[in-house]
Amino acid sequence: MAALAPRPAALPIGLFGGMFDPIHYGHLRTAFELLQKLNLSEVVLVPAGQPPHRETPLASSELRLSMVRAAVRDQPGFSVDDREIRRAGRSYSVDTVSELRREHPQRSLCLLVGMDAFLGMPGWHRWRAIFELCHVVVARRPGWDQPVTGPLAELIAQRGTDAVAELHRCSGGRILIQPVTQLEIASSDLRALLLSGQDLRYLVPEPVRDIIQSTGCYAPRDH
């Protein structure tokens, strides 16, 4: 394993990317728990622009960005970064983390991912480079097990830690698996509810619900 950078001068920054199509309380609860449990300075939500491995989002990039901003507007410790929306071409996590590493050369950076996303990382563009640029914190909900064989299991053996303090002592290079509260909410299920004419009250923040209702961005489309 490469030598880790010296002790950061400030609390770590959490990076939480996703399609957010739409953002919901499952996303927000996970981000909030990690903000507190890891003692992060902030969690930066980064809506994806053009996803390389997924279908085109139903809501436009601008609307998804608006929904994320509306969802976290009054929450201390949350901020929104629109660089992937502004960036031309595909949205690769390694590019985003590389840019932020250049902007914060000595700062601890923590990429926050769910276990499902973590298990899919070997399919990401230049995925191994991510572990050299930042820490990876895996939010584990009940029912998800970490890999015990394969390249990810090897990386956990090399880089894994159970100590949150490790994320504060160095700027990157560690993997921490952190249990979080399980909220069985998925954006795909919310889109299906909307297409069937149902209401998302109590599943998404009210400002997000207002945007969805006023724009009709998930309404059935005529063919």
Image (spheres, helix red, strand yellow):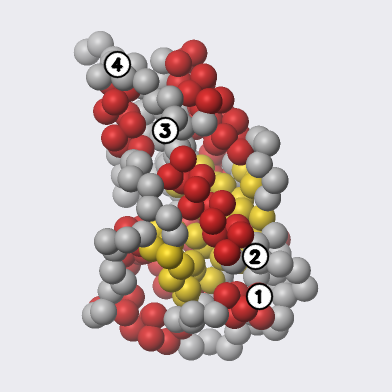
State yes or no: discs 3 and 2 in contact (Cβ < 8 Å). Answer: no
State yes or no: discs 1 and 2 in contact (Cβ < 8 Å). Answer: yes
Question: Which residue has dot 2 on it?
Answer: 39
Residue 97 in view of the camera: no
- What percent of the width, then of the height, locates residue 149? 24, 80
Question: Which residue has dot 1 on it?
Answer: 168
Question: Which residue has dot 3 on it?
Answer: 203
- What percent of the width, then of the height, locates residue 70? 60, 31
> At label 1, which amino acid type do we have?
His
Disc 1 to disc 4, C-alpha distance? 46 Å
Q: Which comes sooner in the sequence, label 4 or label 3?
A: 4
The answer to whether 53 is drawn above or below residue 130 in the figure is above
Question: Which SS class for mark 2?
Answer: loop
> At label 3, which amino acid type do we have?
Leu
The answer to whether 159 is drawn above or below residue 50 in the figure is below
- Please tell me which residue is depicted at 61% across the width and 38% down the height of the picture: 72
